[in-house]
Amino acid sequence: MSREAAITAAHALLEDGSYLEVMRRRVAIPTASQDPESGPQLRAYLEQEMLPELRSQGFTGEIFDNPTGKGGPFLIGRRIEDPALPTLLTYGHGDTVLGLDDGWLPGLSPWVLEQRGERLYGRGIVDNKGQHTANLMAMEAVRRLRGGKLGYNVTVMLETSEEVGSPGIEEICQQQRDLLKADVLIASDGPRLVPDVPTLTLGTRGALSFDLVVHYREGGHHSGNWGGLLANPGIRLAHAITSLVGPEGQVLLRELVPERIPDNVRRALADCRVDGGETGPKIDPWWGERGLTAAEKVFGWNTFEVLAFSTGNPAAPVNAVPPRAFARCQIRYTVDRDVESFLPAIRHHLDALGFADVAVEPVKEGAEWKATRMDPEGSWPRLVAESIRRTTGKAPMIVPNAGGSLPNDSFADTLGLPTIYIPHSYSGCSQHAPNEHALLPLVREGLEIAAGVFWDLGEQPWPGR
């Protein structure tokens, strides 16, 4: 019984086909939470697939209906070796985005796992079925090598509505606080920064969506007869937006960005690179906040994006001054600014510049996850990073918060936990598009990393205890 044996056992889960067999079953369940008819499949994933596996590993488990009535159910499983021992909480989501069947490569289906070379194709193989499956299988391999005990307690939380904003997760965390009580959350979601270097992510940026709307009148009016007499809402809205964000992406309204990047965050990001691999987009180095590195722009700063803009009839333009213009905007933000101040600041700014005709309307659909961040130089990141270095021989990149968003505020703020995510994927994996795939070398290394971390947690005192 040794650490090396545990890593070898986890490695073998891929080589002997065990991991692939499990993933064939799980990918085959079409758990697309964006489909309003997916409810039975979401429940089946938990009831028929995950709960039996957890019970076979000594967990007690229960499925909870979504307390909001607007999403899929939750599964909470617990394995208590000794109430006096520390407790690990791990998390995953069993839902996926829509299959988008027609866009896949010839011969591929989103709901059929298929290996082509070093790639495993299938919806959910990285987001997120494949990642939480790898962790749980590696954990079980470690437990068996230790004679059935890890040396700490484990709680598993699986949800089925992450892709539609995780409705109900905050309520579940509040209502089941005792069941979810733990010392740390360690899970896997999202991509590495670069494919060949492990990543630790310690939090997330938040996401605030809102609409800017100019509505002058009902119906369009002939541009020959009325052009120059009727205010054009598209032009007004375009100028309002350019008062908020410049032509190279710099946020001009400084109340929407941090005053500075904290020194510990800047030090961590100095070792981080952003690279989507061969299939990722090429970075535009001239875009965004001046004077920042690529990693600082996406992980240490706030960004203002226009997600959609429409006026008139874009599909069939006509010779008319349009009555209305609309833009769906989004701010991705770090913990350095209070999100509650953003929309009032925008309203005050527009009024001061004479844009009182531009309405600022909050969007209350989808995710409203708030920003979280841990100290990248803290005890937990150092412990896990050293474990990964021992396993792989590579120092992981430590990201204080991801650029994207997760319901991490429910774990970090509501449950008060240190939170660490160890991605087993890469940013070119097409996770929300056709041809979602995992890279076999990353799956293999992910299994080994997970085994090393779960072994090491049973070998040493935990920070904070």
Image (tube, grey):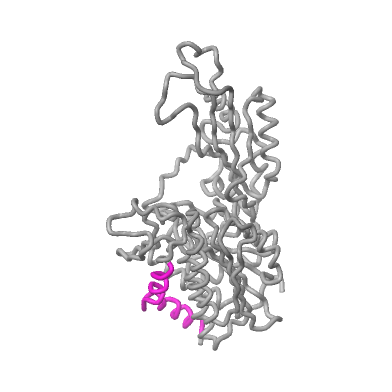
Instruction: Check if residue 11 falls in the magenta segment.
Output: yes
Q: Nearer the viewer, residue 431 or 66?
A: 66
Across and down, in percent, residue 379 comes to 65, 67
Q: Nearer the viewer, residue 35 or 142?
A: 35
- Tell me the quadrant of the picture where the C terminus can be found: bottom right
Q: For residue 195, what is the image quadrant?
A: bottom left
Q: Which residues are magenta?
A: 2-26
Main SS, magenta region, reads helix
Q: Nearer the viewer, residue 128 or 314?
A: 314
Residue displayed at 66% across by 34% down: 346
Q: Is residue 377 above or below residue 311?
A: below
Q: Is residue 43 above or below residue 292?
A: below
Across and down, in percent, residue 461 comes to 66, 77
Instruction: Check if residue 435 falls in the magenta segment.
Output: no
Answer yes or no: is residue 374 visible.
Answer: no
Total numbered labels:
0
Residue displayed at 46% across by 72% down: 447
Residue displayed at 62% across by 76% down: 78
Asked if residue 145 lies left or right of residue 380, the reply is left
Looking at the image, which residue sits at the far left? 106
Across and down, in percent, residue 122 comes to 38, 62
Answer yes or no: is residue 67 visible.
Answer: yes
Q: Nearer the viewer, residue 366 or 277?
A: 366
Across and down, in percent, residue 30 comes to 43, 62
